[in-house]
Amino acid sequence: MKLFITGDIHGKQSFQKLQPRFFPQGPSLSAEDMLIVAGDFGLPVLPGNPEGDYYLDDLASRKYTTLFIDGNHEHFDILAGLKTEYRYDGPVGLLRPNVLHLRRGYVYEIGGLSFFALGGARGMGNMAGYGFDCREIPSEREFQRGLDLLEERGWRVDCVLTHAAPARFMPRLYETFNACPVSKYLDGIYDRLEFTKWFCGHYHRDIDFSGAGVHFLSERILKLDTSVPLERGAKLRNCRAGLEEGRDWTVIEGLL
C-alpha cells in the first residue's frame, strides 16, 4: 500500500492540491492506498447539503481512502453526527465510505504503523463559512482518553498526527505566540512519548524539524514508505508538484 499525508484542505480553498495537476500520483492509487489530512478538512463545504457536495463527491469518487483528523475550521455538528464504525483498531466517523474521520485521542493501526491522533486547536482567526465553536478544543474526556491509551501502549507509537503542534515549537514560528491549550497538552506528551514521526497542520507553514522528526504541513503531500523501517531523521518525499525545498518549505536541523 501507499500512504500520503498532507496539511489543511479548508473545504474548497486548498482542494486543488489534490487534483492530478498537483498530485500526479493520485489517479494511479488503488483502494489499498491512503491519504491522511492533518486537520481543517472543512468538508462538506455547505453543511446544509452534505449529500450533494461537489468537492466531497469528487474526493469520494477516487479509489483511495482519505482519513482526516479535525482542526478548528470544521462543521462540528456534522462530524458529531457521523455513523461510527471500527476500523484500523479504532472508531472512525463515515463521511463517505472511503472518507473517514479519525476520532480524538485514539491510536490507529494504518499501513503497519501506529498513529496517535488528536484533532482540534484554538482558532487563529475567522474563516468564511466556519464560525467559532467551543468544540474546536478537545474536551477533558478526549484529552484524558489520549493519555490513558498512550499509557496502555507504554508511551510508544510510530507516528503522531495532530492539528496543533507542541508549544515548544511556537517560538520558531512566531516572535510572540500564546500557546493554545492543545499545544500545551501536546508539549507534555512530547516529553514522555517515544515516537518516530510527528505530523501537524494548522499553521499554514511547511517546515521539517528533521532532528526532532516533526513535520509541519500545509501545501506539501508527503509520502511514507511503509516497506522500510521508519526513521526519525529520514527525509520524506514531497509529492506535491511545483514545490521546492528552500523556496516552499524549510528544514531546521537539531532537536527541541
Image: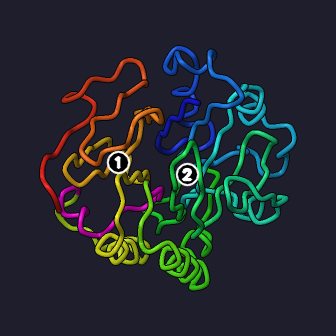
Dot 1 or dot 2: first in sequence order is: 2
Q: Is residue 136 above or below residue 97?
A: below
Residue under numbered circle 2:
40
Q: In what element is the residue under mark 2?
A: loop
Q: Is residue 236 above or below residue 141?
A: above
At horizontal 24% and vertical 68% (from top left) the residue drawn is 168
Residue 49, magenta (yes or no):
no
Q: Amino acid at mark 2?
A: Asp
> Toward the viewer: 239 or 121?
239
Considering the image in quadrants, where does the N terminus appear? top right
At horizontal 62% and vertical 15% (from top left) the residue drawn is 28
Q: In what element is the residue under mark 1?
A: strand
Residue 62: x %, y % from top left:
72, 25
Q: CA distance from mark 1 to mark 2?
A: 14 Å
Residue 49: x %, y % from top left:
85, 46
* Left or right: residue 108 compared with residue 249: right
Residue 162: x %, y % from top left:
47, 59
Number of numbered discs present?
Answer: 2
Q: Amino acid at mark 1?
A: Phe
Q: Nearer the viewer, mark 1 or mark 2?
A: 1
- Chain part drawn in magenta: 159-173
Q: Is residue 134 above or below residue 18?
A: below
Q: Are marks 1 and 2 in contact (CB under 8 Å)?
A: no
> Toward the viewer: 134 or 152?
152
Dot 1 alpha-carbon crowd within 10 angstroms: few under 14, some 14 to 19, many 20 or more: many
**Residue 71's quadrant in the figure?**
bottom right
Dot 2 alpha-carbon crowd within 10 angstroms: few under 14, some 14 to 19, many 20 or more: many
Residue 25: x %, y % from top left:
54, 18
Residue 161, magenta (yes or no):
yes
- The image's mark for residue 216 is 1
